Amino acid sequence: MKKTSPLLIALAWAIVGIPWLWGFSQTVQKAAALFQ
Amino acid sequence: MPSFFDRSSQIAGPGFSRWLVPPAALAIHLCIGQAYAFSVFKLPMTKLIGITKSAPDDWTQSQLGWIFSIAIVFLGLSAAVFGRWVESGGPRRAMFVAACCFGGGFLVAAAGVQLHNIWIVYLGYGVLGGIGLGIGYISPVSTLIKWFPDRPGMATGMAIMGFGGGAMIASPLSLMLMKSYATPEAVGVAATFVTMGAVYFLVMMFGVFLVRLPADGWKPEGFVPRAVSGGMITVGNVMVDQAFKTRQFWQLWLVLCMNVTAGIGILETASPMIQEMFPGHVTAVTAGGFVGLLSIFNMAGRFVWSSTSDYIGRRSTYMIFFTLGIVLYASIPSIGHMGSVPLFVAVCAIVLSMYGGGFATIPAYLKDVFGTMHVGAIHGRLLTAWSVAGVLGPVLVNYIRDYQLAKGVAKPDAYNVTMYLVAILLAVGFASNWFMRPVDDRHHYQGTPLEA
């Protein structure tokens, strides 16, 4: 039985996670204006 | 030989990790979540001819407002109409069609912008893109529930959180692209649409290649499925057409509709509302920060609340949404009188987390009540509640505010009646959820489980 490589799982999460983190950081920067 | 899109080709082999399925679902939801950021195009699209300022022949804000409305209406309609087709063909075929429609919708809309024909934009982003939104939204839901029978709330919450996160990517990305494509002769909207259509198609195709269905009888290691129905959770299955005839379907429809109406009302008018309720205390920039904070809570609520529902139950989760929602909405006018901006922000943040949580918890609620067999198709039909709420929420807030102002009510108090009215709507949702009971056995499908 060929098990899915943990590297493939990490890569798949990175492909969706990196743009998501970028968008999240942009939104956090925008939201920071509320506390200034 | 089965083709790439045949259901049999989508069955995972032994050793396939279920943790590859959430990224596949996220690839779809992070893209289609762009819809919530469409407003960034509104102002530039009113200057397509005048470039620096609107020319007489340029489109108006009202004409452009219809693009998003058409897309949301087609989201609900296509999810309802194609739900069963999505279930029967499996997620790969549905995700592919969603990628073609959503990516293609951008390209058609780009042609509409280039030719300055609003009807082509309505057809492209509104109709075609809206169909992509609807099919894309429901395509991974039942697959995730099948892969994560031990944590269905968390699994669907992850994907639906992606829909909230999609706007966070699309908003700055759109602005960056328009800025880079802008020339003295063009505002850069058409080129941005072409780029986004191509990029979204490719990212969604990543999901198409990655997604798999579990083999029949597969279950996570150590997971023991329930042998008998208990509480709201059934071990039986209800077919989509039969579910449509049950009282429970319409109760859940009302639950979703009331929860979304309440949240969307605030989401739609967040920026002007905080500025008008606290004149002199909140600038336009600070209001932009408020909108950003609400997006974060909307997204986080999708994961946190739906994961919590795996432990406390779906019905209890919605009881919290409605009870807390009634108290919070009814307190907003008093908070306005107190002039407490931090308290207002905190209340709205909690309310928006429950708005997102409502979207993310409903698939698992449907699975508990109707079983897994047709959960995707039933979810599709239930999303018509979103279409109705998408019109009802903003209309309630905007029209009542305008009516109040016309009657001479001061701007900071113009939202008070709406807040009390929303609290009443939440009470309707509370009652609908309170009287929720398991589906009668006579509605259960008696044969071998079918996919559609």
Image: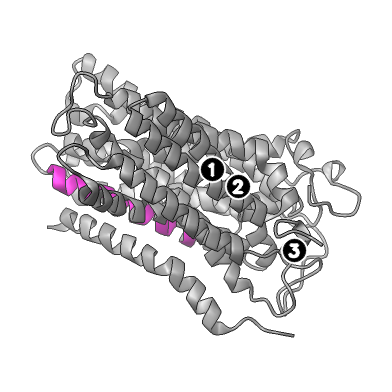
Q: Residue at x 48, y 47 (%)?
A: B103
| Quarter of the figure with the N terminus of chain B | bottom right
User: Is residue B413 rendered to the left or right of residue B149?
Assistant: left
Q: Circles 2 and 1: CB distance less than 8 Å?
A: yes
Vertical placement of B352 versus B223: above or below? above
The residue to which callout 1 is attached is: B101
Q: Tell me which label, 1 or 3, sits earlier in the chain.
A: 3
Q: Position of residue B170 (x, y in %)?
A: 35, 52
| Residue B285 within the segment the image draws in magenta | yes
What's the CA distance linking mark 2 and mark 1? 6 Å
Q: Earlier in the sequence, mark 2 or mark 3?
A: 3
- The magenta span reads B282-303
The disc numbered 2 marks a residue on which chain? B
Question: What residue sits 70% from the left and 80% below the top?
Answer: B15
Q: Position of residue B446 (x, y in %)?
A: 90, 49
- The residue type indicated by label 3 comes to Ser
- Check residue B9 in the rendering and tell me which mark sits there, or answer none: 3
- Give the SS element for disc 3: helix
Mark-to-mark CA distance, 1 and 3: 23 Å
Q: CA distance from mark 2 to mark 3?
A: 17 Å
SS at badge 1: helix
Q: Which residue is mark 2?
A: B97
Is residue B352 visible in the rendered image? The answer is no
